[in-house]
Amino acid sequence: MLQSIITVKNLVKKYGDFTAIKDISFEVFEGEIFGLLGPNGAGKTTTLEIIETLREKTSGEVYVDGFSIDTGPEQIKRRIGVQLQSAGYYPNLNLSELIELFSGLYGIDVKPMELLEKVALTDKAKSKYKALSGGQKQRFSIATTLINQPKIIFLDEPTTGLDPQARRNLWNLIQDIRQSGTTIVITTHYMDEAEVLCDRVAFVDSGKIIGIDTPDHFIDTLVASGFERKKEVKKANLEDVFIHLTGKEWRED
């Protein structure tokens, strides 16, 4: 039986007369990759920030690993990892020093090289964050979510702006993290990414959830309704060609 690790019940978030989140409910199961999909302004990021205890809700209930965001925010913070924005990294510290700084804030002992090895950045241990490529910055930001050995990590559009090679490599990293037993909640605008990575997805539009299911079931239901693509679907696409020609190994960009 699947065990729920995040439960959202009748969540509402209002800003004055504007309702950003409109009575949404869903569950995330332990060990899965769960995607929140939708257009800009749909309410995805607001929902994540409420679950992460970074933003106050207007009403509803949210439980993370059995703790309510109302009564147990500190317990929740110890169980989750949240991707930092680039502004959160001190410019004069190298990657090893940044990891040591963040681990000190958590009050735990982390070996920077072991963590950097997980994201293929050991050769950049003495580099400053600003000197990294786009893909390297994203891998390092994911590494920082793992510092406190969380049960759940939240990734908000982790591959935006990356080239196809860096994006595929980041997919592999995310899948490896899930294989270690970590639950992952992800937002993305790339439907192919969600189809590859996510066990289940929720489509959000105008502050409402309009569907939750596995990617395969969503696709099969659409096809069964008589939907046909205008162009024949081939066994590979142009991105696959790019990856095949340029190689899949970690690269500088």
Image (spheres, helix red, strand yellow):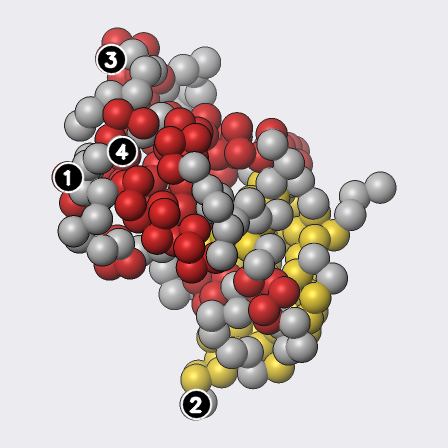
Q: CA distance from mark 1 to mark 3?
A: 23 Å
Q: Label 2: how many residues lie within 10 Å, few (<14), some (14-19) or many (20+)?
A: few
| Residue found at x 43% / y 51% | 103
Label 4: which secondary element: loop
Would residue 151 appear left or right of 172 to someone viewing this image?
right
Of badges 1 and 3, nearer the viewer stands: 1
Q: CA distance from mark 2 to mark 4?
A: 46 Å
Residue 198 visible to an observer of this rendering: yes
Q: Do residues under tags 3 and 4 come within 8 Å of each other at their CB atoms?
A: no
Ranked by sequence position, the earlier of labels 1 and 3 is 1
Taking depth in this image into account, of 164 and 93 the one nearest to the observer is: 93
Q: CA distance from mark 1 to mark 4?
A: 11 Å
Q: Which residue is mark 2?
A: 16
Q: CA distance from mark 1 to mark 2?
A: 42 Å
Q: CA distance from mark 3 to mark 4?
A: 26 Å
* Amino acid type of the residue that numbered disc 4 sits on in the rendered structure: Ala
Taking depth in this image into account, of 101 and 141 the one nearest to the observer is: 101
Ranked by sequence position, the earlier of labels 3 and 2 is 2
Provide residue 24's location: percent of width, then percent of height. Answer: 62, 68
Ranked by sequence position, the earlier of labels 3 and 4 is 4
Label 3: which secondary element: helix
Q: Which residue is mark 3?
A: 246
Q: Which mark is residue 131?
A: 1
| Residue found at x 47% / y 70% | 54
**Figure check: 146 above or below 45:** above
Label 2: which secondary element: loop
| Residue found at x 36% / y 60% | 40
**Figure check: 132 above or below 62:** above
**Figure check: 119 above or below 149:** above
